[in-house]
Amino acid sequence: MKIVVPIKQVPNMSQVKFETDKGIVDRSSADAEINPFDLYALEAAVQIRDKLGGTVTVISMGPRRAVSALRDALARGADSAVLLEDQKFAGADTLATSYTLACAIKKRGEFVLIICGEKTVDGDTGQVGPELAEHLNIPHVAYVSKLAEVGEKLVVVCDMEGESYTVESGFPVLITVTKDINTPRLPTFRDKANARKAAIEVWGAEELAAIADRRRFGVRGSPTRVHKVMIPSEEGRKGKVFRNTVDEAIGEVADAILNLL
Amino acid sequence: MNDDKGVMVLAEQREGEVHPVSYELLGKGREIADRLGVPLSSVLLGNQMQAEVRELVYYGADKVFWYDHPIFKDLDLLNYKHNIVKLVREVKPEIFLLGATHWGRSLGPRIAVALDTGLTADCTGLEIDEDGGLIQIRPAFSGNVLAQIKTRTRPQMATVRYKVMPSMRRDVNRKGEIIRKDAELLPSLLTIVHKERLGEVNITEADVIVSGGWGLKKAGDFCLLADLAELLGATVGSSRPPVDSGWIGREHQVGFSGNTVKPRIYVACGISGSPQHLAGMRQSDVIIAINSDPSAPIFRVADYGVIGDLYEVVPKLIERIKMKRGSS
């Protein structure tokens, strides 16, 4: 079974500094890591491969340092890795990103299953997976929390607002997975050592030129643009904090609650 | 530049019931349409939903495009996409909105790609710019920032968070046109073979939530919060760590990795208030925080904060509420 797992390198969100006064996000203040949700997608792919045979290819669109995320993915069980790196890919919104990934996947050749994480911790859109499926003209199921069957057909369980749907699909198909699906493995020291030696293919706009419309890459291919970023303020909150007077606090809080109910 | 006009809203339905976010979209859609001087329409794909279609008019739609076909009893991804895309190409709205429900966030991206247009996810604000373009406001970076986004293509598409936009008042005297459309059907390729409700809890709908975090010492201590919750008719919630530790089910989880909630009252007990948790509950009407750590970030977003041990404060709070209730 040929499986593709798109991954993204993101800043470690607990380390990113947000400067409230200037409204700035300082990505450089944080270490880079594989998007946590993608680890679940990768684990799902590796488990399927271990059971049924096949290959797991991870693919990422990003700057050169994203190679470290791809090596991490190889250490966690992926068989091969492709980096899509080119200045022309930069500044992409989800439409351009999914288009670029789709071109690369088409170039890579035959696949039957694509597994994506539910969303990224920096973009938070959850759009690239479903968009990728549309570019590739294959069905998709989002918010998959369980793989019930993988074989002749794919049977998954997806959760949507407290309702659980069991969905059957043929191949090829794309799924996005939630954190309920598995527990991602940790790479061993040896896995990491092997990953360091692995060859990673790097493709730029040229490599995709034969099958792509280059105007659809990067900023040029991005219909949406961020105009402004603001750090939300907490204006409007009462901010009544009781420090030493627990009993008084409880009285007021109880009153407040009862008035609201 | 283009002759796309009008605001269109997807009315989401499950099992013949229209999701309330649809009315919120109509409410905001009405406001935007009036500002732009353009019509507001809605599209509903659902079998035998005559009454529901009229409701969409009562809640603000000038026109409702209705695809009445048994195939839409189920959430049929490809047939939804195909027919909506065809309709949008025909009607050419400048703005197309869907609810940021799981369904909306799964379907929307496919429609956007088919229309080769921009889509902004999970908007908590929508405004019209001086040039008549739509400013789409949404949280990013796990809820740490608010981004303002604009789209140069048409339609400008956005999924909009539930319980944020106001619905219009229902007006049975509102007039609107109901247009029945013939569905063009494709092979579904996906089959829903089973459906079930995941337990009793639907925390996203809760009006009052009592939530616990790492300040709890063990799983069983959620009982203490359950006691308070029962008293208030509340649902019990949790931050991420207790859920990851298996102390309580993920359906109770509030935060970036869990559920986004908007109750009238949110009581955070022993929750420090990480940005990821705040992302899921900062829109609550009133936030009450109980934490023994005076520097806990939760106090920055609280309307009422009590610096104290939750094991002391919560029982006292329960007692005080019972007492006040008893005497009134």
Image: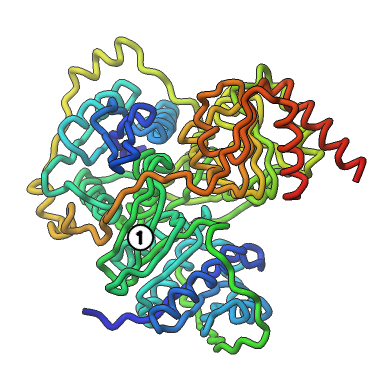
Q: Provide the chain ID for the residue under circle 1.
A: B
- Quadrant in the picture for residue A214: bottom left
Q: Residue furthest right?
A: B327
Which percent across, then down, holds residue A1? 36, 37
Which percent across, then down, holds residue A127? 38, 51
* Residue nearest the viewer, comparing B160 with B300: B300
Please give left or right for residue A89 compared with residue B83 in the image.
left
The residue shown at (53%, 55%) is B101
Q: Is residue A58 visible?
A: no
Which percent across, then down, holds residue B80? 48, 67
* Residue nearest the viewer, comparing A220 with B25: B25
- Color scheme of the displayed model: rainbow
Report crowding for label 1: few under 14, some 14 to 19, many 20 or more residues within 10 A (C-alpha): many
Q: Is residue B14 visible?
A: yes
Q: Residue furthest left?
A: A206
* Tag 1 residue: B119
Rendered view: B188 above or below A30: below
Identify residue type, mark 1.
Leu
Rendered view: B203 above or below B34: above
Q: How many marks?
A: 1
- Callout 1 secondary element: strand
Please give left or right for residue B317 compared with residue B153 in the image.
right
Q: Can you say which quadrant of the picture contains the N terminus of chain B?
A: bottom left
Rendered view: B292 above or below A232: above
* Residue nearest the viewer, comparing A206 with B43: B43
Which percent across, then down, holds residue A81? 23, 32
The residue shown at (52%, 49%) is A236
